[in-house]
Each structure stands twice: as structure tokens, then as C-alpha cells.
Image (tube, rainbow, N blue to C red):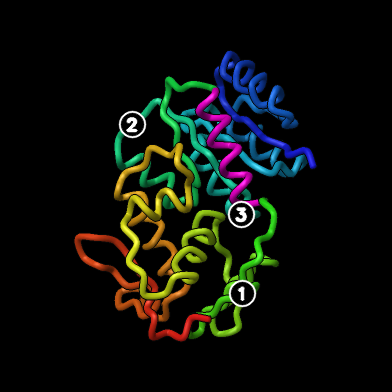
Amino acid sequence: MTRKILIADDEQHILDTLGAYLRQEGYQVVEARDGRAALYTFRHEHPDLVILDVMMPEMDGFEAARMIRKEADVPLLFLTARVEDIDQVTGLELGADEYVTKPFSPRVVVARVRALLRRIYGELSTEPVIWRAGAVELNTETRVVTVHGERIDLTPTEFALLHALMTRPGRVFTRMELLDLVQGDAYAGFDRTIDVHIKNLRAKIEDDPRHPRHIETVFGVGYRMNEDENVE
């Protein structure tokens, strides 16, 4: 099926250029010139993926993302001319799945979009449908995660991260390995990216995020799923 992409940026040449590249790849593209227009378009067009510029009039990309995240777990990709770590962490804490700094190559953005869509909407594998770790249950077919029987909402990246850890209990993943698994080889990430996602994920699945039982930190290396939590 044809996937629909929303691009929100106040620079018309970016909308024109990036839109042309995405359409050439067969995607349907809708556009917005500011944050409020992006939110309106999102609600009426129901895109499969959203690309947001951070600095936009009316409503910036962070606020637009915050509003979108309240309504759906659609994958989000931020575009920004700001490169400070705090800005990237802010975006990640809002549930962003990708972060691209300007100036950028449209081909790189298209590659990131393709990888995100493939990871999130790709064909089902032959792996077990249900994975369990203690009170946590993950269904790969319905993409539903429950804790103590209660459904919780995860961003696409959080789901992919939890899935990667649950399928290999006890296996220590480095931060870069997790970046490759959940973001794709094209992602130019940094260590704090995974730390932010793990913090967000623990807040949702752990009874006490300050003393996690499921996702363990291996200091100086990365993270692993506690194999004593009966993952199956």
C-alpha cells in the first residue's frame, strides 16, 4: 500500500525538494508550513509518518509532536538546524524516532523514512507472536504491550527496543548495537539516545523505574533483559 508522509517546515524549498524526493519513491506527501497547520493536517490526513521541523511559527515542532503523541504513536522524524544535545534529548523524550540536522541530503532523509516504515510496518516474521517477561507481555502481531494485564502505549522506537531486548534475554547489547537494531544502519546516533529511550521505556513497564527488574544496566557497556524474568 502507498504510505502517506506529512512534512511540516516553514521553508518552502525544503517542502518542495523533500516532497519531490519522497514522491519519486512512491510515497503520498501532504505538507504544512507551521506547527498548527501540521497538527490540523495530521488530524485530517492521518499520515503513516510525520516529518517535523523544530523551529516553526505559530507552534514549534516540539509542541506539535507533544500534541501528536497524545493522539497516536505514528513515527516522528525531526528536522532541525540546532545541534545541541539538549535539543536532541528533548525530541527523544517527546517520542521522536529520528533526528536529522540541517543542512541534510534529501536522499539521507528518504533512507531514514524508508527504514522507519520498513521497521514499523514491515511484514510479519516467523518468530513467536507473544513474548513475556514477568508481568510484561509483547504481541508482535498486534503490536500491543501489556503490564499486569493493562495495555500501555509505546512509541514505535520504544516497541522496537523492548522487542529487541525481550527476544534475547540475558544478552548484553551495547548502546550502538541497540541504535542499529531500532534505528537502522543509516542512523548517526549518540550514546545518550538509547539512554533516553531506556529511561522512557522503564517509566512505562517497570513497577519502580529507579530500581528496574526487567531492563538491567550493564555499566560501561549497555543494557540487557533480565533472563530471570521468565521471557518466553
Q: Can you give x and y, in whole percent of width and height, for residue 59 in the image?
A: 54, 35
Q: Is residue 162 above or below residue 77?
A: below
Amino acid carrying mark 2 in the image: Val
Q: Provide the major secondary structure of the magenta segment.
A: helix
Q: Is residue 214 above or below residue 16?
A: below
Residue 50 figure quarter: top right
Query: Which circle's residue, 3 or 1, is located before the other in the chain?
Result: 3
Seen at 48% across and 44% down, the residue is 184
Q: Are marks 1 and 2 in contact (CB under 8 Å)?
A: no
Dot 3 corresponds to which residue? 73
Query: Which circle's residue, 2 or 3, is located before the other in the chain?
Result: 3
Q: Can you give x and y, in whole percent of width and height, for residue 31 in the image?
A: 68, 27
Q: Is residue 135 above or below residue 210?
A: below
Dot 1 corresponds to which residue? 151
Seen at 32% across and 66% down, the residue is 172
Magenta stretch containing residue 104, yes or no?
no
Which of the two residues, 180 or 67, is positioned nearer the viewer here? Answer: 180
